Amino acid sequence: MRSRQSGMTLIELLLATLLLAAGLGIAFSAMRSAVRTMASAEVLLTGSEQMRTTRGLLRRQLAQAHPVAWAEDRQGRAILFDGGPQHMRFVAPLPGVVSEGGLFVQSLWIEPRAGTRALMFGYRMLDDGNDESAHALDPERPLVLVEDMGELRFVYPDEHVPDGHSPSAYLRGLTEAGAAARYPAGLPEKVRGMIE
């Protein structure tokens, strides 16, 4: 009688190789899927962090806004704040790491870019007298706060404005009434200058 030799037959070897290849294919596919998932999660986290940082910057800057005139409208009235769906301009100090102090006219605007929108930021020193420079740090390279925003616009809270008044005229009237109540003997020149 013949003794059986120990070992694997050619069919068993091919079957083992096929199972090993299938296992490696599944492992490679799972690893590639995990890498893609991690990359997309990292993009989402980076975007979320960028939005959180930008939101914090905007809140701080708007909270520090000063009621200081930086220009005049067509009727010669002082402009303290200018805002619309695509832009916003106000006076406030810059964060300490950016400036050496003082007040700056700060501009935020929405700029269309290749099928998307970007939130831009510019500033200029209040006293330089050149209102045109308020839209950029450097006209060649404005500061981009947020890129790739599908829908972006500025929305302002609705305020009750009586019929027949513009929001700025109504605010001016409230300011003058408040100033008259605060200073019944008459407005100091410094306060009048700030209001005008």
Image (tube, rainbow, N blue to C red):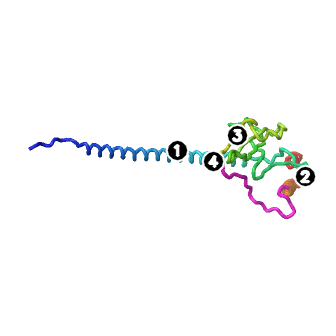
Query: What is the CA distance from the residue labelled 3 to the residue labelled 4?
Result: 15 Å
Secondary structure at numbered mark 3: strand
Measured Cα–Cα span from mark 2 to mark 1: 64 Å
Name the mark on residue 54. Answer: none
Image depth: mark 4 or mark 1 in front: 1
List the residue tagged with mark 4: 51
Q: Separation of disc 4 and disc 1 at Cα?
A: 18 Å
* Residue ID for mark 3: 143
Q: Which residue is mark 2?
A: 186
The amino acid sitting under disc 3 is Leu
Q: Is residue 168 left or right of residue 140?
A: right
The label shown at residue 39 is 1
Dot 3 crowding, Cα within 10 Å, few <14, some 14–19, many 20+? some
Q: Secondary structure at mark 1?
A: helix
Residue at the bottom extreme, as displayed: 163
Quadrant of residue 163 in the image? bottom right
Which of marks 4 and 2 precedes in the sequence? 4
Task: Give the residue drawn at x 71%, y 46%.
Answer: 112
Residue type of the residue flagged with mark 4: Met
- In this view of the protein, which residue sits in the foreground, 133 or 81? 133
Question: Percent x, y for residue 120?
Answer: 71, 44
In the image, the segment drawn in magenta is 148-168
Assess whether mark 4 and mark 2 are in contact (beta carbons under 8 angstroms). Answer: no
Judged by its main secondary structure, the magenta piece is: loop
Label 4: few (<14), some (14–19) or many (≥20) C-alpha neighbours in 10 Å? some
Q: Is residue 155 magenta?
A: yes
* Pointers 3 and 4 in contact (C-beta within 8 Å): no
Q: Disc 4 on helix, strand or loop?
A: helix
